[in-house]
Structures are given as C-alpha cells and as structure tokens.
C-alpha cells in the first residue's frame, strides 16, 4: 500500500489520512493543530491574514486544501522564533517599529514580510509596499509595517 499522506508543519510531521478533502489548510492548522497564529479574516483570499509559507512560498491558507499537500512543508508564524524563544528578526522589527494596532493582521504580515525579504523584494519602500500589498491592515499601520520590513531587510 502507498505510504500514508503526511504534511510537515514547523518541522513536525502530521498525518493527513482520513482528512475531509474539503478542509482548508487554515482550518486544519487552527482546529486540528491548535496553531491559531494564522487568522481567518475574509476566508476568500483577499486579506492575507491567513498567510503561511508552503515550501517557502507565501500562500493564503484559506485557499489551499490540506488534503492536497502530501509531502509538502508548511511554516506558520509559530515556527519563526528560535527554540530558545528568541524572536525572528522580522518579529523583533515589528515590535521595534510599533507595526500594528489591533494586531489581527500581524501574523500574516510577519510571515509575508519574511518571504518578501527572502525573495529579494524589500529593496525600497515602494517595492515593499507592492510586494506586501496582499496583506491588508484595517488600522492602516502601513508606514510602520513598511519601516519594520525595511529595517529587518537591512
Ligand atoms: Fe485567507 Fe483572508 S483569510 S486571505
């Protein structure tokens, strides 16, 4: 028989066997794994609050079906800090720059910023604004978010 489908999340391997094929990655992370960092804002791919990394690339977890991810690897905001609790430089930069107000969009912003920097799209304020444009902030903390990303990328 074929090996049971699995998905790696923040380094730990999880079984996908028997999963309802309609379950989104977002619901699976939040409800099965209790990883509630990724937020459900719009649940239709418009706000970015659910952003996670899939094999290192940004995805809206509300648009991906978990059952399709056999053999893949997901990183959520919970997986960014070091094991000793030291924050990821992007997380620290968000604190240093006060880059949030209510904080609801922050996990998605942080994950998106990590990818933005890794992909080399954080060279200028304009570039950061463009490549972070999939992450909405209802409090409009954009100047602080942009400054945090710029700082973390430096
Ligand atoms: Fe997924 Fe808004 S909840 S993009």
Image: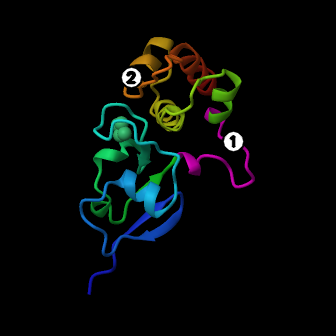
Where is residue 137? Give x, y as percent.
46, 23
Element at badge 1? loop
Residue indicated by mark 2:
133
Q: Is residue 25 left or right of residue 36?
A: left
Vertical side of 66 occupied by 107: above or below: above
**Any magenta on residue 82?**
yes
Q: Quadrant of residue 41?
A: top left
Q: Is residue 2 left or right of residue 108?
A: left
The dot on residue 151 is none
Residue indicated by mark 1:
87
Vertical side of 128 occupied by 10: above or below: below
- Decide whether the magenta segment is chiefly helix, strand or loop: loop
Question: Is label 1 within 8 A of ligand 1 (CB to nearest ligand atom)?
Answer: no
Q: Residue at the spot x=39%, y=23% of the render?
A: 133
Q: Quadrant of the N terminus?
A: bottom left
Q: How is the image coloured?
A: rainbow
Where is residue 42? Give x, y as percent.
34, 36
Element at badge 2? loop
Of residues 27 and 75, the one drawn nearer to the viewer in this rendering? 27
Question: Is label 2 within 8 A of ligand 1 (CB to nearest ligand atom)?
Answer: no
Q: Residue at the spot x=46%, y=55% of the render?
A: 30
Q: Quadrant of residue 68?
A: bottom left
Vertical side of 88 occupied by 19: above or below: below
Of residues 84 and 38, the one drawn nearer to the viewer in this rendering? 38
Q: Which residues are magenta?
A: 77-90
User: Pointer 2 and pointer 1: residues touching (CB < 8 Å)?
Assistant: no
Q: Residue at the spot x=44%, y=33% of the render?
A: 119
As measured in the structure, the alpha-carbon distance from the residue carrying label 2 to the one carrying label 1 is 24 Å
Q: Is residue 96 left or right of residue 52?
A: right
Q: Quadrant of the C terminus?
A: top right
């Amino acid at each position: 028989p074929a090996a049971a489908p699995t998905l790696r999340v923040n380094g730990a391997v999880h079984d996908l066997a028997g999963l309802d094929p309609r379950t989104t990655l977002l619901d699976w992370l939040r409800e099965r794994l209790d990883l509630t960092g990724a937020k459900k804002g719009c649940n239709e791919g418009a706000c970015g609050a659910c952003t996670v990394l899939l094999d290192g690339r940004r995805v809206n977890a509300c648009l991906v079906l978990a059952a399709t991810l056999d053999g893949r690897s997901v990183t959520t905001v919970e997986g960014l800090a070091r094991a000793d609790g030291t924050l990821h430089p992007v997380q620290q930069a968000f604190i240093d720059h006060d880059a949030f107000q209510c904080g609801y969009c922050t996990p998605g912003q942080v994950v998106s910023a990590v990818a933005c920097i890794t992909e080399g799209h954080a060279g200028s304020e304009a570039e950061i604004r463009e490549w972070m444009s999939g992450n909405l902030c209802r409090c409009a903390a954009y100047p602080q978010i942009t400054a945090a990303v710029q700082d973390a990328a430096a």
